[in-house]
Image (tube, grey):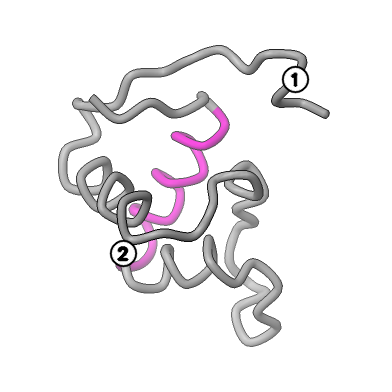
Amino acid sequence: MIKMTREQYEQMMAYKRVTWFSLFIKQVNESMDLENTGLPLVNAFDDWGVSIERETDLMKAWISPEDVELVEVTDEQRD
């Protein structure tokens, strides 16, 4: 299971409806890319971190969204 907040899940699914994974992961890793300003923000992933493991988790979630476990955001995560 890949754990995501509802906001992360909704942002990922918004991208999935209109584009491909490579553009989504580029926005997650480089969120201020001015070339793609017409696309939805992925600010829910600001604290996601850039790593191969995290990209693999996002690819798995992209391919099988039914394997995503929605988790609550804690107060520490909000700060």
For disc 2, the marked residue is 21
- Residue 18 image label: none
What percent of the width, then of the height, locates residue 22?
Answer: 33, 72
Q: Which quadrant does the C terminus fall into? A: top right
What percent of the width, then of the height, locates residue 8?
Answer: 52, 37
For disc 1, the marked residue is 76
Measured Cα–Cα span from mark 2 to mark 1? 29 Å
Asked whether disc 2 touches disc 1, contact meaning CB atoms under 8 Å apart, the reply is: no
Q: Crowding near pointer 2: few (<14 within 10 Å), some, many (20+)?
A: some
**Identity of the amino acid at label 2?**
Phe
Tell which circle, 2 or 1, labels the residue nearer the N-terminal end: 2
What percent of the width, then of the height, locates residue 28?
Answer: 53, 61
Q: Secondary structure at mark 2?
A: helix
Residue 61 lies in what quarter of the image?
A: top left
**Magenta residues, dominant SS class:** helix
Q: Secondary structure at mark 1?
A: helix
Q: Looking at the image, which residue is at 51% across and 44% down?
A: 11
Q: Which quadrant does the N terminus fall into? A: top left
Q: Determine whether, in the image, residue 24 is placed left or right of residue 78.
A: left
**Identity of the amino acid at label 1?**
Glu
Q: Nearer the viewer, residue 30 or 34?
A: 30
The residue range painted magenta reads 7-21
- Verify whether residue 13 appears in magenta: yes
Q: Looking at the image, which residue is at 75% across and 20% down?
A: 76
Q: Determine whether, in the image, residue 79 is placed left or right of residue 67.
A: right
What percent of the width, then of the height, locates residue 40?
Answer: 60, 58
In this view, 58 is above or below 77: below
Q: Nearer the viewer, residue 8 or 54?
A: 54
Q: Crowding near pointer 1: few (<14 within 10 Å), some, many (20+)?
A: few
**In the image as oriented, which residue stretches furthest toward the bottom?**
35
